[in-house]
């Protein structure tokens, strides 16, 4: 119950903060476009939902442990310099390039890269415009130039008929093209890959693609309408586009798109693993080989206890099954089975003629 | 489509002859094409030729899923613990370290944990998992309870495993002697036992 209250407070707090930023950034709503109010309220709802879910997620024992440890290790003055360098490198390689997704498959990498950058560009244009954080005005005394205002402050001015104006004012077109390419590639993979077909679900895997395609297609129709068709059906298309965007925003906290907010945890984990590798290692208490950082094993023991698992052992030297390496765990399963069969199918222990045939305690606990 | 209820997986590591057919067949599975999810380990090369193939045991309450900070591991309604969901897995290694059977594999270059999903592309349409179709010795068997009982008259399948104070129930069964009347295999107790190689390699003859 406390978890839900805490998540509700965080959700309401962040939603209120965004509301305040919208009022301030649009200069008391002076630059706020009332026609886009539906988008604003959908975004505020999505903000509440995302923060609520994120907060609930952070309160799960394993997530909380990694969150706290990740920040502790990242901000530790001893590692901070290197961490910052690694942070920049990883943001570039992991997030900007999606290197790890390309390695999983070229088609998958291309689809994700196009979808991600299409959505990033679209979000970077849409949200500031909707919130009134960015607007354009004609430059005084020069009707052929526009000036962009960010949070009400004047910035770059550019001629209306320049390539820069063409690129900026068609930003959402470029984003839509990227998204549609990504959707097509992803759809093809999902329709033809037997492995994907076995585990995919409509709501989890197809619906996000359909939503992104609907947003992009209706957005492009708007451009086509005012560019080549003298605004034919523009009002209808504007409402249709708004419906697709608003429904997707409302769904943002619930479905697959939540991974956008979850995924940066990968960065925290990478620092945890990096620094863990430089700290004391945990040696398997059966074979003696190092298999993980001691910090990781101890954290995991605590998490398992919080979750109600009881892998504690009576043996004082081993203490907990978590101190056994994964390979030894696999072997123990077969040794346990063999011990059940001992004497049933004939034969005897291989080392029966040797005294103390079992593995000695000192060998086991190196 | 779920895995048919009357079809179950039975493992009998003592029958393994180390031929690696399962390892190679596993990588043919469409859900993890090109990557084998089977672990085939020598128990102790100095003492015995015995090998052990390990597949996911598909626990009723999977520790790997519970300790996952990203909530990336899901158990489907038919009891199959699926491999990590690609958009969610953050490659933290918790599942690899927490699984009491030592099953999950970390693909560091993919930033992804991968594990046996009982060949879900096949079992969910009524086919056998790749490994069970090629295992020549019956160490990995997929079929009905009646079939396994008629094939292994001296054995009985059980699916409860003890690790210290923790009892784990699994979807996959392991074959143990019927005459012992056991309901639980105490895996952690094997920590203090030497491999009994002769018994293990003799199992194939039964």
Image (cartoon, helix red, strand yellow):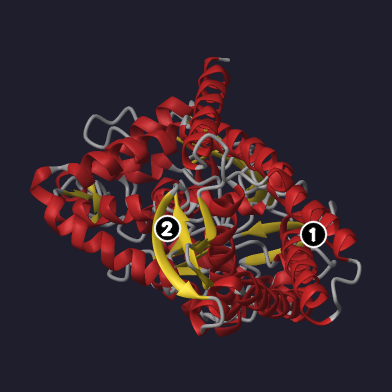
- Cβ atoms under marks 1 and 2 closer than 8 Å: no
Q: Residue at x 50, y 56 (%)?
A: B89
Q: Residue at x 65, y 44 (%)?
A: B158
Tell which subunit mark 1 falls on. Answer: A
Give the quarter of the figure containing the N terminus of chain A: top right
Estimate how packed mark 1 is, as few (under 14), some (14 to 19) or many (20 or more) residues with alpha carbons within 10 Å: many
Q: Residue A241: which numbered mark, if any?
A: 1
Left or right: A163 as drawn, with respect to A246:
left
Q: Quadrant of residue B55?
A: bottom right
Distance from Cα at disc 1 to Cα at disc 2? 37 Å
Q: Quadrant of residue B130?
A: bottom right
Regarding residue B108, the answer to whether it shows in the image is: no
Observer-nearest of B4 and A111: A111
Percent position (x, y) of residue A334? 47, 56
Residue at the disc numbered 2: B91
Observer-nearest of B82 and A8: A8
């Amino acid at each position: 119950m406390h978890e839900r209250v805490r998540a509700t407070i965080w959700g309401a707090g962040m939603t209120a903060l965004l509301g305040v930023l919208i009022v301030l950034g649009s200069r008391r709503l002076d630059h706020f476009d009332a026609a886009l109010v539906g988008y604003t309220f959908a975004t505020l709802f999505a903000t509440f939902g995302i923060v609520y879910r994120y907060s609930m997620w952070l309160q799960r024992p394993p997530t909380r442990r990694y969150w706290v440890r990740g920040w502790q290790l990242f901000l530790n003055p001893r590692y901070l310099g290197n961490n910052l360098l690694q942070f920049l490198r990883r943001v570039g390689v992991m997030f900007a390039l999606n290197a790890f997704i390309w390695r999983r498959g070229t088609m998958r990498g291309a689809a994700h890269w196009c979808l991600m950058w299409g959505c990033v560009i679209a979000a970077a244009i849409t949200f500031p415009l909707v919130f009134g954080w960015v607007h354009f005005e004609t430059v005084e005394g020069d009707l052929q130039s526009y000036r962009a205002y960010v949070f009400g402050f004047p910035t770059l001015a550019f001629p209306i008929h320049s390539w820069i104006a063409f690129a900026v004012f068609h930003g959402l077109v470029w984003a839509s093209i990227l998204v549609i390419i990504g959707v097509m590639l992803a759809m093809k993979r999902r329709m033809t890959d037997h492995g994907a077909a076995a585990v995919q679900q409509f709501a989890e895997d197809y619906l996000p693609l359909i939503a992104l395609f609907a947003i992009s297609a209706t957005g492009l129709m708007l451009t086509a309408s005012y560019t080549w068709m003298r605004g034919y059906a523009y009002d209808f298309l504007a409402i249709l586009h708004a419906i697709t965007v608003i429904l997707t925003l409302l769904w943002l906290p619930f479905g697959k798109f939540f991974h956008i907010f979850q995924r940066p945890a990968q960065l925290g984990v990478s620092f945890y693993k990096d620094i863990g590798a430089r700290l004391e290692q945990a040696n398997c208490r059966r074979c003696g080989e190092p298999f993980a950082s001691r910090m990781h094993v101890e954290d995991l023991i605590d998490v398992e206890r919080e979750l109600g698992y009881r892998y504690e052992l009576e043996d004082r030297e081993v203490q907990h099954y978590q101190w056994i390496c994964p390979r030894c765990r696999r072997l123990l399963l077969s040794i346990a089975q063999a011990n059940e069969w001992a004497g049933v199918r004939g034969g005897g222990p291989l080392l029966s003629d040797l005294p103390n045939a079992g593995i000695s305690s000192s060998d086991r606990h190196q | 489509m779920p895995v048919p209820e009357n079809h179950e997986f039975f493992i009998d590591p003592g029958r393994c002859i180390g031929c690696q057919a399962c390892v190679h067949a596993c990588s043919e599975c469409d859900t993890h094409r090109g990557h084998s999810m089977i672990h085939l380990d020598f128990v102790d090369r100095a003492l015995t030729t015995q090998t052990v193939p390990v597949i996911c045991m598909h626990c009723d309450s999977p520790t790997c899923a519970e300790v996952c900070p990203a909530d990336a591991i899901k158990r489907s309604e038919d009891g199959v613990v699926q491999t990590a969901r690609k958009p969610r897995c953050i490659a933290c290694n918790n599942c690899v370290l927490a699984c009491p059977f030592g099953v999950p594999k970390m693909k560091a270059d993919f930033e992804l944990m991968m594990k046996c999903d009982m060949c879900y592309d096949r079992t969910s349409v009524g086919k056998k998992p790749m490994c069970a179709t090629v295992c020549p010795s019956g160490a990995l068997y997929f079929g009905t309870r009646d079939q396994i009982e008629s094939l292994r008259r001296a054995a009985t399948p059980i699916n409860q495993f003890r690790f210290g104070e923790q009892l784990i129930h699994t979807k996959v069964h392991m074959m143990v002697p019927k005459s012992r009347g056991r309901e639980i295999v105490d895996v952690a107790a094997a920590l203090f036992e030497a491999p009994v190689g002769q018994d293990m390699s003799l199992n194939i003859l039964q």
